[in-house]
Image: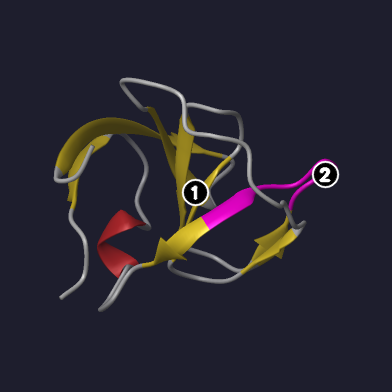
Amino acid sequence: MLPLTINMRDHLRQEKTGDLPAPLPNIARQRDFRVGTLGLWGPDDFVIYYRDGQVPSPGIAILGRITGDVSILDRPGPVTVTVRRAR
């Protein structure tokens, strides 16, 4: 699906969330995350974390990490992001 542009909304002042155009396969999940983590809450619920934290079970599927500064996401309101594979 990459590159992919996603409209995202702020959630709990720790993450931005948006919908993927199609679900991804199930992969292992974990509860802890760090700043810059890219993940899935559900099969098509994409998240970018801009603060460290933990989520309830069953956790999130980790897809990758943002390279660079994520502080631009640490603001209320929606954003539009483009996700590309790192080179």
Residue positioned most to the right: 57
Residue receiving disc 1: 15
Residue in the image at 32% along x and 33% along y: 8
Horizontal relation, residue 34 to residue 15: left or right: right
Residue 47 spot, x, y in % from top left: 47, 44
Residue at image point 82% right, 44% down: 56
Quarter the C terminus occupies:
bottom left
What mark, if any, has residue 86 been given in the picture? none
Q: Amino acid at mark 1?
A: Glu
Q: Secondary structure at mark 2?
A: loop
Instruction: Please say if 32 is above or below 83.
Output: below
Q: Is residue 52 above or below residue 27?
A: below
Query: Real-space Cα distance between discs 1 and 2?
Result: 14 Å
Q: Earlier in the sequence, mark 1 or mark 2?
A: 1
Examine the structure image and report whether residue 69 is included in the region drawn in magenta.
no
- Residue interval drawn in magenta: 55-62
Q: Residues within 10 Å of mark 2 (few under 14, many from 20)?
A: few
Residue 34: where, in percent of width, then height?
58, 71
